[in-house]
Image (cartoon, coloured by chain):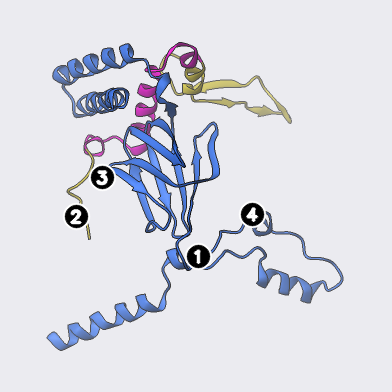
Chain colours: A yellow, B blue
C-alpha cells in the first residue's frame, strides 16, 4: 500500500487538514470584491456560545471565538 | 514454504470476492425489515413507528447502462449551491489535476485543491473558485462536491489577489519555522490559483 512518504507539505509541518482548509477558505474570502466581502467576513467567525447552568437556569452566555482577537 | 504462502494468498482473495464492493450496492432500503418484523411479533395491533431510514431518500441503484446525465450535489457549509442538479459534465480541481467527471465515471473520492470548478450543462458553463474540499463520485453517476468556500469568478478582486501573492511570497522568504513556511506556501498556492482562475 502507499507508504507514508507522500504526505502533503502542510501535514509534514504539523498542520491538520481542517486547519489547512480553513486557512484556504479565509484567504479566498479576503480576495472577494467589496459587497461580497462584508458578508463573507461574517462567515469567517467561528464561535461557540457557552452558558453555565445553575439552579436550573442558564447564566449569561459567553461567546468563545476561534479568532485570536476575541 | 512457497506452497504454504500460495495457500495463504488464496484465502484472502476468496474472502474479497465473497464480499461485494461498496460501489456495486443495490438501491438502499427504505424500511428496516428486521425491526418491522420484530415489532409486528411484539405488538401486532400497532403500526411500527417510522425509523430514520424511512425518512431518508433511498440511494438510487447503480444502473446497468450508463445514464445520460450526471447528478451533482454541490454543498457549502452555509448553503447548498446545487442540489441533485442534472448536468452533462463537471470539471473538478483535484489535487492530482483537473478531473473531468462524466456520467458513468468510476466511483472515486478525490481531495480538491484551490482551483476552478466548472459545471457544464448543455451549452452553458458555470464556474466557481473552490477553496478546498472533497468530491465523492458514486457508481450510480451521482457526484457530491463539498467545499468550504466557493465563489463565482466575477466576485474575485484582482488587485487583492496580486497583493496577497506578493505578501505571501515575501512571507515565505522570511519564514523561520516549518509552520510559518507551510502557511506562506498555502498562501502562495491559493493566490496563484486565484490568479490563474482570473486569467484562464
**What's the distance in space between the residues labelled 2 and 3, CA to CA?**
17 Å
Whether residue B87 is visible to the viewer of this picture, yes or no, is yes
Q: Position of residue B129 (x, y in %)?
A: 38, 29
Which sits earlier in the primary sequence, circle 3 or circle 4? 4
Within the image, what quadrant is residue B165 found in? top left
Residue name at image x 23 percent, y 29 percent: B182
Chain under numbered label 1 = B
User: In this rendering, do the residues under marks 2 and 1 share a single chain?
Assistant: no
Q: Quadrant of the C terminus of chain B?
A: top left
Can you identify the residue that label 2 sits on?
A: A3
Q: Position of residue B52 (x, y in %)?
A: 66, 56
- Which of pointers 3 and 4 indicates the residue nearer the eye? 3
Q: Quadrant of the N terminus of chain B?
A: bottom left
Mark 4: secondary structure: loop
What residue span does the magenta drawing correspond to?
Answer: A9-38
Residue name at image x 48 percent, y 52 percent: B69
- Magenta span: helix, strand or loop, mainly? helix
Which sits earlier in the primary sequence, circle 3 or circle 1? 1
Can you identify the residue that label 3 sits on?
A: B96
**What's the distance in space between the residues labelled 3 and 4, CA to CA?**
34 Å
Amino acid at each position: 500500500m502507499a507508504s507514508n512518504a507522500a504526505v502533503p507539505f502542510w501535514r509534514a509541518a504539523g498542520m491538520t487538514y481542517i486547519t489547512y482548509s480553513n486557512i484556504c477558505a479565509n484567504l479566498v474570502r479576503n480576495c472577494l470584491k467589496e459587497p461580497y466581502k462584508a458578508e463573507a467576513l461574517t462567515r469567517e467567525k467561528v464561535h461557540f456560545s457557552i452558558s453555565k447552568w445553575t439552579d436550573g437556569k442558564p447564566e449569561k452566555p459567553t461567546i468563545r471565538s476561534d479568532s485570536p482577537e476575541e | 514454504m512457497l506452497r504454504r504462502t500460495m495457500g495463504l494468498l488464496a484465502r484472502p482473495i476468496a474472502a474479497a470476492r465473497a464480499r461485494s464492493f461498496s460501489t456495486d450496492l443495490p438501491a438502499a432500503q427504505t424500511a428496516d425489515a428486521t425491526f418491522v418484523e420484530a415489532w409486528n411479533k411484539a405488538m401486532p395491533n400497532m403500526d411500527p413507528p417510522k425509523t430514520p431510514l424511512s425518512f431518508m431518500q433511498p440511494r438510487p441503484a447503480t444502473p446497468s447502462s450508463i445514464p445520460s446525465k450526471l447528478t451533482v450535489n454541490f454543498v457549502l457549509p452555509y448553503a447548498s449551491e446545487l442540489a441533485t442538479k442534472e448536468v452533462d459534465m463537471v470539471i473538478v480541481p483535484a489535487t492530482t489535476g483537473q478531473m473531468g467527471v462524466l456520467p458513468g465515471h468510476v466511483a472515486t473520492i478525490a481531495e480538491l485543491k484551490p482551483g476552478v470548478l466548472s459545471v457544464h450543462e448543455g451549452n452553458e458553463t458555470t464556474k466557481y473558485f473552490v477553496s478546498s474540499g472533497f468530491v465523492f463520485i458514486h457508481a450510480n453517476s451521482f457526484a457530491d462536491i463539498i467545499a468550504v468556500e466557493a465563489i463565482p469568478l466575477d466576485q474575485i478582486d484582482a488587485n487583492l489577489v496580486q497583493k496577497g501573492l506578493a505578501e505571501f511570497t515575501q512571507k515565505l522568504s522570511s519564514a523561520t519555522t516549518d509552520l510559518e513556511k507551510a502557511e506562506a506556501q498555502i498562501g502562495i498556492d491559493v493566490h496563484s490559483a486565484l490568479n490563474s482562475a482570473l486569467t484562464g
